Image: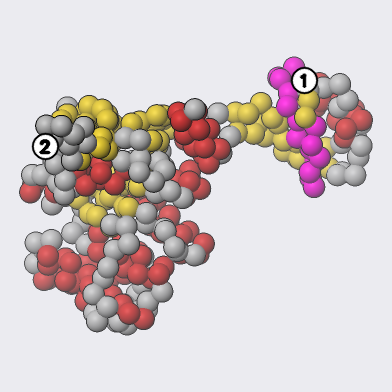
């Protein structure tokens, strides 16, 4: 393992319970992952897949049964490495009687930063998460989205190198989710590493560089978004005018013709696509767009988990 990696896990296992006559429950079964610097890493899996157990071990909140887990090249649990991590837990609870600004000041000092450092950093974070105007209102007055944004800010108060977010957009409206996504991308642009545990697949697909899919304590698939969402073989044509008889024009080419409001889709190979383009142009139809359709992450996730359980 190298110090250049932010997270490195090798053959990690975790068994709960068990004993002389009991087998116990294997929550993690030989997990191996590597997370490099300056990236957004997504952890996916159904309930009970082992995601939360993995996060707890990385944070030193649970002990491994076997294998190896490191942060910044050090074994997990070291105070020095944990100090470089920011964490937003799922369903976190903030002190309702404090204002958002006071929450950040409190958590900043709990992280070991002095008061002057924290007070200088708070306004920047409030601006980053779009909570400047509500900073002096009590947390009890905040919506779920506002609480999530302040929670995200507290995870960043000590300027960590690695940020672990557990369901960061759960229960947040679309506007709030978009704001949190933008914050995550800003962090990536600043060279931070973000580790996201989420069941909202669209969010993961939009922002993650690499994704691991877990089920029953094992990794069943991992890769970049492009690797996990292969082409389906279908091609979308956006055309003008949209009133032409497209089905007649491309008759005999490909299969699965489906018309849409701006053109059509069909399953076709490269030769058939070329022929379709030639026929459309010969018929006086302008091609405004041509897109090879891909499986989305939700489809890939369902297919992967279904196959694993078959």
User: Is residue 3 in view?
Assistant: no
Residue under the image location 14 percent in, 41 percent down: 63
Q: Are marks 2 and 1 in contact (CB under 8 Å)?
A: no
Q: Nearer the viewer, residue 281 or 259?
A: 259
Residue under the image location 49 percent in, 37 percent down: 301
- Taking 267 as reference, is 74 left or right? left
Where's residue 13, x and y in %?
21, 32
Q: Quadrant of the N terminus?
A: top left
Query: Dot 2 corresponds to which residue?
Result: 75
On the image, which quarter does residue 43 sit in?
A: top left
**Within the magenta stretch, is there residue 171?**
no
**Residue at the outermost top position:** 271
Residue under the image location 18 percent in, 67 percent down: 107
**Residue at the outermost front position:** 21
Where's residue 205, x and y in %?
48, 43
Query: Dot 1 corresponds to which residue?
Result: 272
Q: In this view, does 125 lie above or below 72?
A: below
Q: Is residue 114 above or below residue 300?
A: below
User: Is residue 213 in view?
Assistant: yes
Where's residue 298, x and y in %?
53, 41
Q: Which of 151 and 133 is in front in this view?
A: 151
**Mark on residue 300?**
none
Q: How many residues crowd mark 1 within 10 Å: few (<14), some (14–19), many (20+)?
A: some
């Amino acid at each position: 393992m190298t110090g250049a990696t932010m997270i490195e896990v090798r053959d990690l296992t975790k068994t709960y319970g068990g004993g002389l006559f009991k087998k116990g429950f294997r929550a993690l079964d030989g997990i191996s992952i590597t997370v490099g610097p300056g990236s957004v890493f997504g952890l996916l899996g159904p309930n009970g897949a082992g995601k939360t157990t993995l996060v707890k071990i990385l944070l030193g909140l649970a002990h491994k049964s076997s294998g190896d887990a490191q942060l910044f090249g050090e074994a997990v649990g070291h105070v020095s490495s944990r100090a470089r991590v920011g964490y937003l837990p799922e369903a976190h609870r903030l002190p309702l009687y404090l204002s958002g600004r006071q929450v950040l000041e409190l958590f900043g000092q709990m992280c070991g930063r002095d008061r002057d450092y924290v007070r200088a950093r708070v306004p920047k974070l409030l601006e980053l998460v779009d909570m400047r105007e509500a900073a002096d209102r009590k947390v009890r007055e905040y919506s779920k989205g506002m609480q999530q944004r302040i929670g995200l800010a507290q995870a960043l108060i000590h300027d960590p190198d690695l940020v672990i977010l557990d369901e960061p957009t759960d229960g947040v409206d679309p506007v709030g989710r978009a704001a949190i996504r933008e914050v995550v991308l800003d962090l990536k642009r600043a060279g931070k590493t973000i580790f996201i545990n989420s069941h909202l697949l669209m969010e993961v697909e939009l922002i993650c560089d690499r994704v691991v899919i877990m089920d029953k304590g094992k990794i069943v698939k991992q890769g970049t978004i492009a690797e996990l969402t292969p082409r389906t073989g279908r091609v979308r044509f956006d055309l003008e005018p949209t009133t032409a008889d497209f089905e007649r024009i491309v008759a005999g080419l490909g299969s699965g013709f489906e018309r849409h409001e701006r053109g059509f889709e069909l399953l076709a190979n490269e030769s058939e696509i070329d022929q379709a383009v030639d026929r459309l142009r010969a018929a006086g139809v302008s091609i405004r767009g041509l897109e090879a359709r891909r499986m989305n992450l939700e489809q890939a996730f369902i297919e992967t988990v279904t196959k694993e359980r078959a």
